[in-house]
Image (spheres, rainbow, N blue to C red):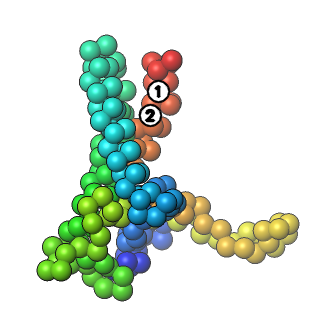
Amino acid sequence: MFLGQEFKIFDWFIIHFTENNGMAFGIEFGGQLGKNILTIFRVIVVSFGIRYIYKLTKEKLPNGALLSLGFIIGGAIGNIIDSIFYGVIFNDSYLKLASLMPEGGGYSRFLEGKVVDMFYFPIINTHFPSWMPFLADQHFIFFRPVFNIADAGISVGIFILIVFYRNFFK
């Protein structure tokens, strides 16, 4: 797919190819240096997270809580892999299809790749009523963020921990 291309599965489910620099909602800071620092920080946090999960396995934590932590760490690792390698093994996909392992190399260096997002769920796509102050007739989409499987794993893991296992982490 090329950047921005999409396939409509249902009105409320679209496969939409986009890339971001690896922070939530495409937030950036510090240019390439900030991107490198963010990627290295993620690797360090995930390393400590894996050690923490290993320690918790010896404390008889419920399997559901361990699974949730696994979703979070697995999602983080997925996004790290994109950040580290995606730019090295693909060329730019702006207005064209990206090539795997292009002759001239990828669009960026090690640690500077983007994260690919593709799931878009515009569940409610409407306009605010004309009688609403400040928002009259403005377009409204409920669930606008585009995300990937790794993001979903992180979100589901956090949700399960908060709802079912918050008492184990006091």
Q: Is residue 4 above or below residue 142?
A: below
Question: Which sits in the foreground, 43 or 115?
Answer: 43
* Secondary structure at numbered mark 2: helix
Mark 2–mark 1 contact, CB under 8 Å? yes
The residue positioned 27% from the left and 66% from the top of the image is: 109
Residue 99 visible in this rendered orientation of the protein: yes
**Image disc number at residue 160:** 2
Q: Amino acid at mark 2?
A: Ile
Residue 149 visible in this rendered orientation of the protein: no
Q: Amino acid at mark 1?
A: Phe
* Secondary structure at numbered mark 1: helix
Point out residue 148 in the picture as x, y percentages from the top left corner: 37, 58
Point out residue 93 in the picture as x, y percentages from the top left corner: 32, 79
**Image disc number at residue 164:** 1
The residue positioned 32% from the left and 64% from the top of the image is: 113
The residue positioned 50% from the left and 24% from the top of the image is: 166
Q: Is residue 23 above or below residue 42?
A: below
